[in-house]
Image: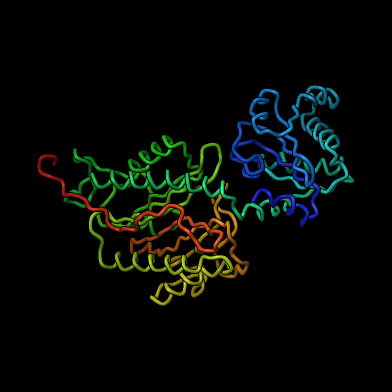
Amino acid sequence: MRDEVPARLAEAQLDALVVIGPGQHNPAMVYLLGRPTALTDAVLIYPREGEALLFHSPMERDAAAQTGLPTRGFDRYPFTRYLKQHNGDRFRARVARWRDILRDVGLAQSRFAVVGRVEFSHGWSLWQALAHELPKAQILGREGWNALAAARMRKGPEEVEAIRRVGRATVAIVDRTRAWLRQLYAADDGRVVDAQGQTVTIGHVKRRIRRWLAEADLEIPHGLIFAQGRDAGVPHNPGNPEQPLYVGQTIVFDIFPQEAGGGYFYDFTRTWVLGRATEEQKRLHHHVRVAFERALARTRAGEAWEAPYLAAAEYLESHGHPTLRTRSGTQTGFVHSLGHGLGLEIHEDPRLMAGATQPLEPGMVVTIEPGLYYPNRGLGFRLEDTVWIRDDGQAEILVPYPYDLEIPLANLGPTTA
């Protein structure tokens, strides 16, 4: 939680965080500001004690003011002045400007960490140079990120509600997708077609989903997965947009949108078969569903991070499926960990995987997503919900939705053939 950050900085013996980069799609900045903010290049000085200070471009002074923090424009440090001092060398000018900023905020002899998102090569060179310019400062990186990650693992009520809000919009789009698919038809050759007999491709489906996401003010910075048959058997295969939809093949639909501007994510997966599923498909889908329920029952405060994974893996192993425990590096069966924390990033701590012995805690938001993958048999299955560990220690699915496997289709009628 945000109010834990000062204590986490104290544990890491850090005097401050220096947060760099934009105010959107920059988790550290968004977290500490409380929401995405229309800043293209900002610096947040976040001390362990005292009030934070936000540096901003003069052109973005209104956006900076809306944060409610004390602000300071970069125009107090005119870049043209530094360029003149350094004969037009832009890099040396940037270093000198940063040196003066850090001196002015009292960090020239402090132990602080730099976090945020900028182009790596520029940031790496800049902070190496600043370490030379400010020899009495201890400029760190990983320690600051760890301190923030520890605070971010437990979500406050407003964060949980933001994730739930994204989840409701996500599930509404999933339901809309399902309803649209049900209006399609099965052609005699197994293709899925529209009422005019035109082939429907995965690309057609994805374009509709993207439009509906945009209408809901959601973004998909990491894309989405709508993968069929053999591709569904490779967990992160996004699906071939040129591939026609076919009846009777498993479809893994994994959707993980984010609030516009880089806010909170939601993560959700269902597996569908258009038309009728085979007995084998029903059996494997059932195995994944039971594995999900076993894992959910072990997702509670006090259990180790690995406990939900072990519950799912043990059940699937008992039905003859390989797992990472029984066959290291397997590409068939249950080939990945069970889930992960979720918030301002799609993958956060905690990690629900073998060997993770830290305890789950109230306030954590995690995904539960067991799966089975047999690409050579044209099969892939995954079921996923995002869950919150409540104050009473029990897990709650933030936005429930049915796990039905089959989506019925009508045969293409003679009037539209």
Residue at (51, 71) in percent of width and height: 310
Relative to 278, does residue 261 appear above or below in the rendering? Answer: above
Horizontally, residue 304 falls left or right of residue 375, namely right
Q: How is the image coloured?
A: rainbow
Relative to 215, does residue 377 appear above or below in the rendering? Answer: below
Residue 271 x %, y %: 35, 57
Q: How many tags in the picture? A: 0
Q: Residue furthest bottom?
A: 318
Residue at (42, 66) in percent of width and height: 293
Q: Residue furthest left?
A: 414
Residue 203 x %, y %: 35, 42
Horizontally, residue 5 falls left or right of residue 99, namely left
Relative to 35, does residue 405 appear above or below in the rendering? Answer: below
Residue 274 x %, y %: 26, 53
Relative to 339, does residue 84 appear above or below in the rendering? Answer: above
Horizontally, residue 112 falls left or right of residue 64, namely right
Q: Nearer the viewer, residue 286 or 415?
A: 286
Where residue 317 sits, quadrant-wise, is bottom left
Q: Nearer the viewer, residue 270 or 327?
A: 270
Quadrant assignment for the C terminus: top left
Q: Nearer the viewer, residue 320 or 146?
A: 146
Residue 322 x %, y %: 44, 72
